[in-house]
Amino acid sequence: MGAGYGGITAALRLARLFRGRPDCHLHLIDRNPYHTLKTQLHEAAVRQTEVSIPIHDIIRHRPILFQAGTVSSIDLANRLVSVDGVSLTFDFLVFALGSQTNFYNIPGLEAYSLPLQTVDDAETIYQHINELCRLASLEANPATRRDLLRFIIGGGGLSGVEFAAELAERALTCGKGHNVEHGDVEVIIIEGAARILPNMEEGFVRRIEKKLQEKGVTILTDTKIASLTAEAVTLSTGEQLGSRSLVWTGGIMVSSLAADSGLKTGAMGRILVDEFLKSPDHPFVYAIGDNALAINPETGAPVPTAAQFALQQGRLVADNIHAVVTGGTPKAYQPKVLGEIVSLGRHLAIGWLALPLLKKITFFGFLGRLLKSASQEKHLLLLRKESRNWIRY
C-alpha cells in the first residue's frame, strides 16, 4: 500500500525476487497513478518542474497489478484490504502510505495555510505565487502591496529551508511583466526550535543561514505560529505579520488507518515494528518509511522520516518477505546514513556524503548542487534497474 519511495522500491524488488512464480501475486495500491519525487516538491512549487512519474511506466515489465484508489479499511483477522469498496485478500501486507500534513490544531492553519506534501500542493503554491505577483503589480496601497509580497514559511526543517531558498531566487524573476522589484518580495522562515535544521550539524546550519540571509531570507527561531487568518499571521511572541501566504512545512502525521485496524502505533501514528520491520503482533504486516516507527539499534532513537531510509527499508522488507516464503533467514534492519544534502536554490547546495572507512566528504556551492542532482538521478536509476525498464522517465 503506497507507491512512494519505499513502496515502489519494495514492489519492484518483490516482483524481481518472485519472478517465475505463477502462484505469487503482487498488488500495488496508491491513490495516485504516479510516483512522486517528494524531495523535489519545493522545485515544482517555485519553478513548476516535473516531479511525478506514471506508475505504469515504472512497472510495465513487471508482474505487478496496480490499483489506483484509496484504502478505506483493513481487516487483519480475515486479511482483507478495502480499496474504494473493493476487497482484496492478502498473505503479506506492506504499509507504505506515507504521511499527511499535521496542523497541530493551530487556529486557522488548516483553513488558510498552503501545505507542501503533494504534487497538487506544489501546483497550488506555484499558481498562488504568480497570482500574488500579478495582484501586487496592480496594487496602489503600499501596505497592501507589502502584505501581498510577504511570503512566510512555517517550519525550518529541510522542506522549509529548500523552499525558502528557491522562493528567494524566484523573487528575482517575480517582477517580469508584473512591475515588481526584487526588494519588494519578503521571505520569512518561522521555526519553533532554537535553530533551523535542528537535526543537522551546527557548522552546516550556520553556513546555510548565512547563504539564506544573503538571498534576503529572514529567519525567526524560537518562534511559533499562534494563529492564522486569510490576511495575517500571529506569532507566539504576540507579533502580527500581514501576509496572504503561509506555506506550512512544520510537521507530519500518519493516517489513523493503522491504529483503526488494530496495529500498535507510537509517536505521530507510526506503526511499531521489530528489527525486521514487521508488526510484533501481526507478523504478516510490515511497515516502511513514514509509516514505520523503526528504531536505530545503535542509538535507540527512532529512524527519521527521510527518503534514504524509506528506500533502504523497502529493499529490506522485500528481501525479508521473500526469505519467509522460501524458508530463508530474514535480516534485521541496520539504518545507514548515506549523507545529507540541502538545496539552496537552483545552483547551490551544502551537505556531506558518507565514504568508506567511516569517512565523509563535505561540499558547498555548485559542486553540492551537482551531487544533489546525482542523488536524485540515482533513485531513478535504481527504479530502472529493479524494473528492468531502461527508458528515461
Image (cartoon, rainbow, N blue to C red):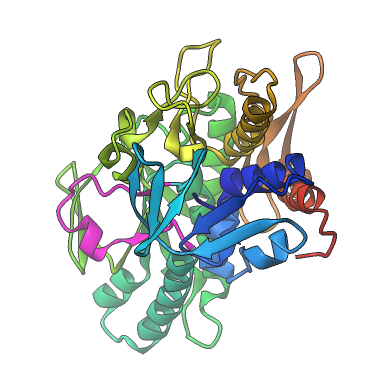
Image spot of residue 79 (x, y percent): 41, 42
Residue 279 seen: yes
What secondary structure characterizes most of the magenta part?
Answer: loop
Q: Quadrant of residue 319?
A: top right
Judge left or right: residue 200 versus residue 311: left
Quick check: 163 above or below 357? below
Image spot of residue 277 (x, y percent): 52, 26
Q: Which residues are magenta?
A: 99-118
In which quadrant of the rendered image does the C terminus lie?
A: bottom right
**In the displayed image of the protein, which residue is found farthest to the front?**
23
Q: Nearer the viewer, residue 169 or 102?
A: 102
Image spot of residue 249 (x, y percent): 39, 50
Quick check: 345 above or below 199? below
Residue at left offset 51%, top offset 39% = 91
Residue 54 seen: no
Total marks placed: 0
Residue 109 among magenta residues:
yes
Residue 18 among magenta residues:
no
Residue at left offset 61%, top offset 50% = 26
Residue at left offset 29%, top offset 86% = 140
Image spot of residue 130 (x, y percent): 46, 79
Quick check: 174 above or below 37? below
Q: Nearer the viewer, residue 145 or 26?
A: 26
Judge left or right: residue 147 versus residue 378: left
Q: Nearer the viewer, residue 262 or 334?
A: 262
Q: Nearer the viewer, residue 73 or 190?
A: 73
Judge left or right: residue 251 versus residue 68: left
